[in-house]
C-alpha cells in the first residue's frame, strides 16, 4: 500500500493526466487554492499541491500532482506515477481528440500503476456548452466500459471540481478499510 499514515492523518497521492491544455493545472489550482489562470501557461511550476479534506472525521491530505507540461512531449516519467493511489484522467469536452486520447492515457496509467488506483474520468470545460464536441453520453459510456468514475467539471466556473477530487479521495479511503 502506498498510502502513508501520519499519526491520525492520511496522505494520498493523486495524479492528474490527460492531453495538453485540457485544464489539468487549472483543476489543480481551483481545488488547492480556489484560483483560475486565464493565461495558458504550460507550467505553473510546482510538482504538486496539497489540500486537506475531511472524510468521516479523518483528516486526509490530498497530494495532487501536476505534469508541469511533460505531457506535451509524451514524457511523463514513471516517477510521476510512483505511489499514486488516485488518478484524474482529463479531457476537454470542446476538443474530441483529447477524448480520443483517453485510452492512451489509461494504457499509460495501467503500465505504471496497479488496478487498485481510484480512477475518475473528467470532462473539463463544461462551461463551453456552445462549442461542445463530446456528449455527456459518450463520456459516461467510456467510463462504464473502462470501469471509471465519471464527472464533467469546469475549472473556470468551479462546477464539480471539489466533487471530482472528493469522490476519488473517498474511494481511496474506502479501499483502505
Ligand atoms: P493543462 O495543459 O492541461 O494543464 O491546461 P491548463 O490548466 O494550462 O489550461 C489550458 C487552457 O484552458 C488555459 O487557457 C485555461 O485558461 C483554459 N481552461 C482550463 N480550464 C478551463 C475550463 O474549465 N473552462 C474554460 N473555458 N477554459 C479552461
Ligand atoms: Mg498544465
Image (spheres, rainbow, N blue to C red):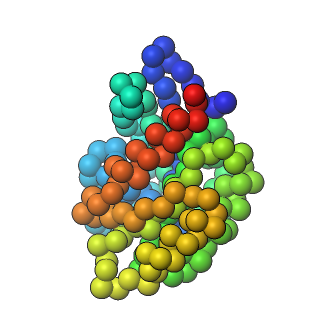
Total labels drawn? 0
In the current view of this chain or complex, which residue is farthest to the right?
111
Left or right: residue 130 versus residue 143 is: left
The residue positioned 29% from the left and 45% from the top of the image is 33
Left or right: residue 159 versus residue 17 is: left
Residues 77 and 171: in front is: 171
The residue positioned 43% from the left and 75% from the top of the image is 136
Please identify the quarter of the rendering in which residue 13 is found.
Answer: top right
Q: In the image, is residue 156 above or below residue 67?
A: below
The residue positioned 69% from the left and 59% from the top of the image is 108
Left or right: residue 166 versus residue 120 is: left
Residues 143 and 94: in front is: 143
Q: Is residue 116 visible?
A: yes
In the current view of this chain or complex, which residue is farthest to the top?
7
Residues 26 and 94: in front is: 94
Q: In the image, is residue 112 above or below residue 158?
A: above
Q: Residue 51 at x, y = what percent?
A: 37, 37
Quadrant of the image for the N terminus?
top right
The residue positioned 41% from the left and 37% from the top of the image is 50
Q: Is residue 59 visible?
A: no
Q: Residue 22 at x, y = what percent?
A: 45, 68
Q: Residue 63 at x, y = what percent?
A: 47, 38
Quadrant of the image for the C terminus?
top right
Please identify the quarter of the rendering in which residue 8 is found.
Answer: top left
Amino acid at each position: 500500500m502506498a498510502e502513508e499514515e501520519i499519526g491520525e492523518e492520511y496522505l494520498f497521492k493523486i495524479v492528474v493526466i490527460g492531453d495538453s491544455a485540457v485544464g489539468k493545472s487549472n483543476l489543480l489550482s481551483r481545488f488547492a487554492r480556489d484560483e483560475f489562470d486565464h493565461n495558458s501557461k504550460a507550467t505553473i511550476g510546482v510538482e504538486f499541491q496539497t489540500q486537506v479534506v475531511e472524510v468521516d472525521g479523518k483528516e486526509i491530505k490530498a497530494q495532487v500532482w501536476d505534469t508541469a507540461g511533460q505531457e506535451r512531449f509524451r514524457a511523463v516519467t514513471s516517477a510521476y506515477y510512483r505511489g499514486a493511489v488516485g488518478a484524474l484522467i482529463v479531457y476537454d469536452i470542446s476538443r474530441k481528440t483529447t477524448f480520443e486520447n483517453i485510452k492512451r492515457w489509461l494504457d499509460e496509467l495501467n503500465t505504471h500503476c496497479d488496478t487498485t488506483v481510484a480512477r475518475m474520468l473528467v470532462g473539463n470545460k463544461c462551461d463551453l456548452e456552445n462549442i461542445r464536441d463530446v456528449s455527456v453520453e459518450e463520456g459516461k459510456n467510456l467510463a462504464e466500459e473502462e470501469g471509471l468514475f465519471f464527472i464533467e467539471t469546469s475549472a473556470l466556473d468551479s462546477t464539480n471540481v471539489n466533487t471530482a477530487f472528493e469522490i476519488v479521495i473517498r474511494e481511496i479511503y474506502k479501499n483502505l478499510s
